Amino acid sequence: MAEEQTGNQITVKARLKELHLIIEVTDNGPGIEKDVLPQIFIPFYSTRKNGSGIGLTLSKNIMRLHQGQLEVESEAGKGATFRLLFPN
């Protein structure tokens, strides 16, 4: 089970850059280990004991169907940022 963390924070930002609407969702959680990062969009891959591993895969596929992209940046211990890029 994951450790409880106090002071949880999620920040959502939106901006226009060139021909894309970009929405960034950032948290201050434990982050994602560097060696795990390339695998998080693989179907049924999960780092959680009771995780199904379909949430991020489904999200990325939905973005592709709308000609968009889903990207992630993270560093262990420093949270994560998920970036949704929508075409204009």
Image (cartoon, rainbow, N blue to C red):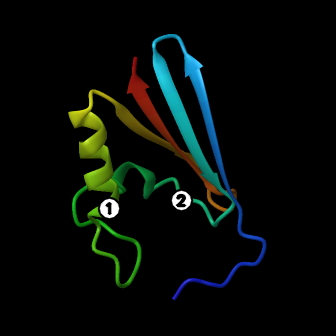
User: Residue 65 at what x, y percent from top left?
Assistant: 21, 35
Residue at the extreme right of the image, as rendered: 7
Q: Identify whether 80 is placed above or below 21.
A: below
Residue under the image location 71 percent in, 78 percent down: 5
Q: Tell whether 57 sits left or right of 25.
A: left
SS category of the residue bearing label 2: loop
Residue at the extreme top of the image, as rendered: 18
User: Residue 4 at what x, y percent from top left?
Assistant: 66, 84
Residue under the image location 29 percent in, 67 percent down: 53
Q: Tell whether 59 sits left or right of 86.
A: left
Q: Identify whether 51 is placed above or below 37.
A: below
Q: Residues within 10 Å of mark 1 (few under 14, many from 20)?
A: some
Picture quarter with the C terminus: top left
Q: Amino acid at mark 2?
A: Ile
User: What label does residue 44 carry, if any?
Assistant: none
Instruction: Quote the CA–CA distance across marks 2 and 1.
Output: 15 Å
Residue under the image location 62 percent in, 50 percent down: 26
Visible residue check, residue 23: yes
Q: Nearer the viewer, residue 26 or 38?
A: 26
Mark closer to the observer (2, 1) = 1
User: Residue 77 at what x, y percent from top left?
Assistant: 68, 62
Q: Nearer the viewer, residue 12 or 1?
A: 12
SS category of the residue bearing label 1: helix
Residue denoted by label 2: 32
Q: Residues within 10 Å of mark 2 (few under 14, many from 20)?
A: some
Visible residue check, residue 75: no
Q: Identify whether 66 is placed above or below 25.
A: above
Q: Amino acid at mark 1?
A: Gly
Residue under the image location 35 percent in, 84 percent down: 50
Q: Are marks 2 and 1 in contact (CB under 8 Å)?
A: no
Residue denoted by label 1: 55
